[in-house]
Structures are given as structure tokens and as C-alpha cells.
């Protein structure tokens, strides 16, 4: 009966009445139901490996220009690290919404299993600038590359790829500063971005710790320069291939104006200079119009190349070395494919490597040439609904750690649950 | 250096700005139903593109670069609303750097905000499936609601393009009046229709309008794929009913539909829930006629 009344009312409503009502901007649901929108991501992993649970530590210590002498007291931490057995990974809390007609704001807070809190992102973006310009400011994940701005729950695997992990850091390039993006009004998608960031990084643009300088008695290092010390540029281009195929190609670079390192093996010495990184990212997606993702395919690859151009600023045992050049170069690569082989099921494969180029020179002669590390990963994920996921992942790595070859086999069983507002499906 | 670069970028933008490109209003619709509506109401004064073809499930799209490119240049976005596009449209709009189409601005239009919705005000409890607290967003197959939305859209278009105000109203009234006549005809034709088992809660607006009983849903919960147990319970409930029909979308799981059809001895028809790309009123009416046919088994 209820149905009949509603139907009658609607049919009876004259079109002219409806026309008269349309003058106001009626209620819209896009992002206005809750302000701020809140979501919580739960993430847990059962983990095991063949190296007494040390697999993730070893992955963080592979030979390369950031682990040349084994930094003491610096332990890899973060989302991917898991010990043998059950692990509660960081719980991500995201708040977002429109501030006013000019700004939207986002915050991402990561809480680890001990209650430790890290502010992953807290930024605003503009929504009112003309000519295709956008400004982002605050602390954010840089928009260079494809994976860099993704949070762990957006990854297609449990862990970060080796290229990013060894050259940028497990979280990606995450810093405080300003971004300017420009989208020209063209027939194909083109995006150009520029970022000026403070330069608080683990790998690219590291600065020596005051306490460490004092404790080691290091002299000759410049004072920490004023920020911003890290600059990035990126561009992404996507040709129009219709509704089923999407291709996006990108180029990016980052430059740190100041980079300092202190090493204490074999003798305390310090290096200072600058550092840069260049990369390219390629993504292809096929939308099969299938049932719950069946038949969808996504191929993705990125290549990174990093250079640290340094000079010896201090040497405890060999004062003559001061002023010598130390140029360090390392590259990294990953390629991955995700395929929806059944409704709500997908299978993902990844090959990632770091250190095909992996050397330290004094400007002309090679002083060190480290081996590369590589890994193959297979993951199967099942999504019971749009808001939950269970993933089984196995990886086999051949790592170079302190000159030794380390074969590492790992297995992960992961769940991820999303509570609250609907997350964004980005390409 | 930064200041110089900013200046250079600003200069570049100024040069790249299109001059006098206001000939036709650029309307970007999320689905082909909304595109059809914009085309009918806007007529010659608009150029319409759709962000997704009718064979995709509009719940599960991703914010792709091509969408962002279209939104970058849009004067008006015509969305379905009621959270149908919540997974991708806000992200695409956010990245499109176009102040005119931000929600709350005249350049952002949601169809479902202007008609009463089925299942509105349900608890936002996802144990009940992918429910939309604002109500069921799939209004596009109800010709009467679409006629009403056409009227509101005409006013919105008139707000952006004042010169077309009268034409937009006229187009909307013609569209609504034509569909109202056809609905009466279809209601007569389906008077003795036996009822339909639907896959998803998206064809129910049309069945309600035609007065055809909805016998159940193949999905146990909205957005959750059919389970063996749910199929058995449907068969138990419906096997003594005599005749009926099953309607589903081309992208639904056909296994479950075929099993149900075979067991019940009912015809199953795959039908799109949106008209084809580039559709006008005639294509929309043709789609509704296919439904009317499918609802009356021979």
C-alpha cells in the first residue's frame, strides 16, 4: 500500500511544480553527509620466514649506497616490518572534509600496536584556484611516481617494493612543504607538479644528527641549511584510449640541496654534499566490465636512479682524505601485475630489484661495487565485500647483505578492514 | 628561484587559457542515463560526455586520468548522487582543479537530490550490504522521476547559461510529458505481468512504477554476490509460484541466474540499466520497451 501511495503522489505531481522547485542548490550527497569523513583501516599480518623471523630486517639492510657502512642505531621500522607470528600493523585513521569554499583538508594518523602515534599526513588542498592550478600544503606524501603517495592499505602487496624501500624509504617521500600542480586544459591528460619540501628524509637529503656530531667529535660539517632543502618535479601523461584501456606514463625527479652522513666504520668520518633522484612510472589498466573485478588487469612498473654527490668533510684517521669526492649511485626497479581471475579474487605478481647500479667512486675510480638484491612475490587476495580483504602472499628473495648472498623466503597472511567513509578508488 | 618558476607557470597558464570557448556548455555526466538527460534538456546548447559506458557498474569505477581530463574542462557535472559515485567521483573532481564543479557550486548537479528515493534513511550498517543511507540511487529506470529530474536540470542549466533558459524548460517539459504518456501505456501492457526476480536493487524503481511485483533479489545483500544458500531459499520460496521472470545486468554472475532460471523454469533476460553511449530520448524509450517486453513472458 505504501508503494501505491508514493507512486500516485509522484505521478500526480505536475511537471510545472517540479520545474519551479529547481532554483536552489538542493542537497548533494557527495562528501557532505559527514564532515569530517572518518575512516579507520585495520591491518593484521601473520608472518613467517626461513631466517628466524629476520627477513624484513634483512630487506631493510641490503647492500647499497644508504647502507654503505651499516648505520648504527638505525633500525628499519614501519608498515612492512613484521616478526614471526601474529602482527597488528599500524591502524590508519583518516579524517577529511571541506574546510570552506577554498580548502579541503586531510589528516592520516597511524597508530602502531603499542599505541605509538605517527602523523603520516596533515595537509590542505585548494579547491578554488583558476587555470587548472592546485596548491597542497602541510605534511604529505609526495605525488612523484605511482606508489609514492599510496598508503599501505592501497598497495597491491603486503610490503613496499625494494626500489622504493632502498632508495626513498618504506613510507615513500613524505615531508612538509608546499606543492603546486597544474593541469592544462588539453585533449589528453597532462599534469605537471612542483614541490618544495623541508627535507627531513631517511635516504635522500639526510642530515647528520647534532648529538651524533658531538658524540663522534666530527668537525667540518656545514650547519643545517634553512628549508626548503628538497625539491621535486613530476609530470604524468595519459593518452585517450577509450573506456576500457588506460595508460599513464610519468617522469619525476627530486633534488636535495644538502646531504650529510656520518659513518664510524672503520674510522669515524663524515660526508657532505647534495643528492638527487630521477625516475619513471608506467601504469596500464584494463577494465573488463566484469563482475566484481573479474577480468580486470593492471600492469605497473617504476624505475628509480639515485645519486649522492659528496665530499669527505672529516676523517678521524686520515686527514688527507678530507676534500676527496665520494660519488654514490644506485638504481631500483619493480614491475607488477594484478589480475582479477574470478569475481572478488585477484592474483598479483611482482618482480623487484635494487642495485643493478650500486657503486661508490672517488670521482674516477670505483671504490666499492655492491651486488644487487632481487625478489619475486606472488599474492592472492579475496574481497568478501567492498570493505574487507584477505591476502596470502609468498616471496622469494636473493639479497646481498654485507657482501653475503642471503636467500630469504617469506609468507604472509593478511587481513585489511575498512570502517567508516568509503575510500577513494584511484587509478 | 621559486618565485621565478611560479611566475613562469602563471604566465604559461594565462597563455594556455582557451579564448571565447563558450559556444557550447560542456556537460560531463557520470552515467549514460544522466548523459541522455543532459542531451535532451540541453539540446543544441550543450556538448555532453559520459564518464562510464553502460556495461560498467557505476559503484566500482576508479578515478581515471581520462575522467579528470573531462572534468577539468567541464561547465557542469551531472551525477546520480546518493553515494552511487562516492568511490571515485569526489576523488576525480578533487584532482580536476576546476572550481566551477565543486559540490555546492552551480556546476555540480546530483539527480537523486530532487526526487524521493526508495529505502531512504536506512541504518548505515554494512552488515546489511553496501547500502546507501541516502536511499537507493538507481532512479534512472523510472521515467516519471527522470521527467522530474529533467525539470530541475533545466533550471540548473538556465542558471549557468541564461540565454537557454526558455529552451531548456521547453525541452524538459516535452521530455517529461512524452514519458508520462508512455508510462500509462506500459502500465496497461504489464497489468498481468507475473512479477520479476531482480539481481540487484536497481530495476525496482521501474517495477514499482509499472506496478509489477518484485519477487526477490538474487544478491543476498546489495553488492554481495549470491550464495548457494540464498539461491536455495529463493527456489524454496518461489517454486510453487507458477510463472515469473528473472532480470539481471550483463555484468552480473550468470551462473547463479542460469541455475535459478533452470530450476524455476523462468526466462532470464540480461538488460542494461543505462541506455547506450550517445543515447537520446528514443534510445532511452527503446530500453524501457525492452523491459516491458521482458516482464511479459509469452
Image (spheres, coloured by chain):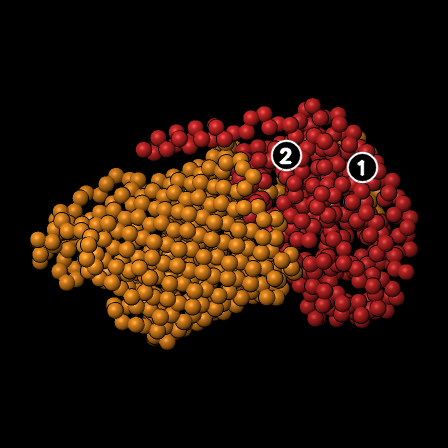
Task: Name the residue: 64% across, 56% down.
Answer: A289
The label nearer to you, 2 versus 1, is 2
The image quadrant that residue B109 belongs to is top right
Whole-percent x and y of residue A90? 42, 59
Q: CA distance from mark 2 to mark 1?
A: 23 Å
Q: Residue furthest top?
A: B163
Task: Name the residue: 76% across, 58% down.
Answer: B270
Please give the letter of the chain rendered in red: B
Depth check, front residue: B139 or B128: B139
Give the SS element for disc 1: helix
Contact between labelled residues 1 and 2, with CB atoms less than 8 Å apart: no
Q: Colour of chain A?
A: orange
Circle 2 chain: B
Q: Which residue is mark 2?
A: B26
- Residue B145 versus residue A377 in the image, above or below: above
Whole-percent x and y of residue B92? 55, 44
The image quadrant that residue A177 belongs to is top left
Amino acid at each position: 500500500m505504501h508503494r501505491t501511495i508514493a507512486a500516485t503522489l509522484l505521478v500526480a505531481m505536475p511537471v510545472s511544480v517540479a520545474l519551479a522547485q529547481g532554483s536552489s542548490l538542493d542537497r548533494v550527497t557527495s562528501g557532505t553527509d559527514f564532515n569530517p569523513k572518518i575512516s579507520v583501516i585495520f591491518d593484521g599480518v601473520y608472518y613467517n620466514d626461513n631466517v628466524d623471523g629476520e627477513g624484513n630486517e634483512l630487506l631493510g639492510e641490503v647492500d647499497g649506497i644508504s647502507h654503505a657502512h651499516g648505520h648504527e642505531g638505525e633500525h628499519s621500522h614501519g608498515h612492512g616490518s613484521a616478526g614471526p607470528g601474529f602482527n597488528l600493523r599500524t591502524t590508519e585513521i583518516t579524517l577529511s572534509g571541506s574546510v570552506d569554499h577554498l580548502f579541503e583538508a586531510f589528516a592520516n594518523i597511524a597508530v602502531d600496536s603499542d599505541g605509538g602515534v605517527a602523523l603520516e599526513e596533515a595537509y590542505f588542498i585548494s579547491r578554488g584556484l583558476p587555470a587548472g592550478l592546485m596548491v597542497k600544503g602541510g605534511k604529505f606524501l609526495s605525488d612523484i611516481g605511482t606508489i609514492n603517495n599510496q598508503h599501505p592499505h592501497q598497495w597491491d602487496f603486503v610490503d613496499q617494493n625494494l626500489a622504493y624501500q632502498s632508495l626513498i624509504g618504506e613510507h615513500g617521500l613524505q615531508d612538509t612543504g608546499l606543492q603546486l600542480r597544474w593541469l592544462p586544459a588539453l585533449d589528453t591528460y597532462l599534469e605537471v607538479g612542483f614541490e618544495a619540501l623541508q627535507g627531513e628524509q631517511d635516504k635522500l637529503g639526510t642530515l647528520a644528527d647534532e648529538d651524533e656530531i658531538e658524540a663522534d667529535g666530527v668537525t667540518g660539517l656545514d650547519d643545517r641549511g634553512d628549508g626548503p632543502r628538497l625539491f621535486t618535479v613530476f609530470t604524468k601523461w595519459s593518452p585517450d584510449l577509450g573506456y576500457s584501456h588506460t595508460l599513464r606514463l610519468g617522469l619525476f625527479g627530486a633534488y636535495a640541496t644538502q646531504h650529510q652522513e656520518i659513518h664510524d666504520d672503520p674510522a669515524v668520518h663524515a660526508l657532505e654534499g647534495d643528492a638527487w633522484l630521477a625516475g619513471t612510472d608506467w601504469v596500464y589498466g584494463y577494465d573488463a566490465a566484469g563482475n566484481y573485478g573479474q577480468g580486470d588487469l593492471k600492469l605497473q612498473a617504476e624505475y628509480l636512479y639515485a645519486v649522492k654527490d659528496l665530499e669527505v668533510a672529516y676523517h678521524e684517521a686520515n686527514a688527507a682524505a678530507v676534500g676527496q669526492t665520494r660519488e654514490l649511485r644506485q638504481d631500483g626497479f619493480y614491475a607488477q601485475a594484478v589480475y582479477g581471475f574470478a569475481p572478488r579474487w585477484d592474483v598479483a605478481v611482482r618482480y623487484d630489484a635494487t642495485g643493478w647500479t650500486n657503486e661508490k667512486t672517488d670521482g674516477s675510480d670505483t671504490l666499492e661495487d655492491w651486488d644487487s638484491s632481487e625478489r619475486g612475490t606472488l599474492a592472492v587476495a579475496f574481497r568478501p565485500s567492498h570493505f574487507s580483504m584477505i591476502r596470502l602472499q609468498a616471496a622469494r628473495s636473493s639479497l646481498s647483505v654485507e657482501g653475503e648472498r642471503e636467500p630469504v623466503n617469506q609468507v604472509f597472511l593478511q587481513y585489511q578492514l575498512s570502517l567508516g567513509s568509503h575510500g577513494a578508488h584511484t587509478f | 628561484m621559486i618565485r621565478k618558476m611560479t611566475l613562469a607557470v602563471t604566465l604559461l597558464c594565462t597563455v594556455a587559457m582557451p579564448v571565447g570557448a563558450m559556444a557550447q556548455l560542456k556537460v560531463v555526466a557520470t552515467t549514460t542515463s544522466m548523459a541522455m538527460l543532459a542531451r535532451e534538456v540541453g539540446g543544441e546548447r550543450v556538448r555532453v560526455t559520459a564518464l562510464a559506458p553502460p556495461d560498467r557498474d557505476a559503484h566500482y569505477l576508479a578515478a581515471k586520468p581520462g575522467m579528470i581530463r573531462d572534468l577539468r574542462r567541464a561547465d557542469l557535472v551531472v551525477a546520480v548522487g546518493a553515494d552511487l559515485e562516492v568511490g571515485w567521483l569526489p576523488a576525480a573532481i578533487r584532482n580536476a582543479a576546476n572550481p566551477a564543479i565543486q559540490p555546492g557550486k552551480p556546476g555540480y548537479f546530483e539527480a537523486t537530490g530532487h526526487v524521493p528515493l526508495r529505502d531512504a534513511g536506512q541504518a548505515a550498517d554494512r552488515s546489511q550490504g553496501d547500502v546507501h543511507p541516502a536511499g537507493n540511487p538507481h532512479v534512472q529506470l523510472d521515467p516519471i522521476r527522470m521527467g522530474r529530474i529533467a525539470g530541475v536540470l533545466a533550471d540548473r542549466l538556465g542558471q549557468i547559461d541564461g540565454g537557454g533558459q526558455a529552451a531548456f524548460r521547453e525541452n524538459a517539459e516535452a521530455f517529461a510529458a512524452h514519458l508520462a504518456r508512455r508510462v500509462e501505456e506500459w502500465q496497461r501492457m504489464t497489468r498481468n505481468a507475473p512479477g520479476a526476480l531482480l539481481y540487484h536493487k536497481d530495476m525496482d524503481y521501474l517495477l514499482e512504477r509499472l506496478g509489477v511485483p518484485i519477487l526477490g533479489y538474487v544478491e543476498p545483500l546489495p553488492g554481495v554476490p549470491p550464495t548457494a544458500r540464498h539461491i536455495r531459499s529463493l527456489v524454496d520460496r518461489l517454486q510453487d509460484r507458477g510463472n515469473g521472470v528473472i532480470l539481471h545486468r550483463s555484468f552480473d554472475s550468470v551462473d547463479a541466474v542460469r541455475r535459478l532460471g533452470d530450476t524455476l523454469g523462468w526466462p532470464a533476460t540480461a538488460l542494461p540499466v543505462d541506455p547506450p553511449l550517445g543515447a537520446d530520448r528514443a534510445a532511452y524509450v527503446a530500453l524501457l520497451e525492452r523491459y516491458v517486453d521482458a516482464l511479459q513472458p509469452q
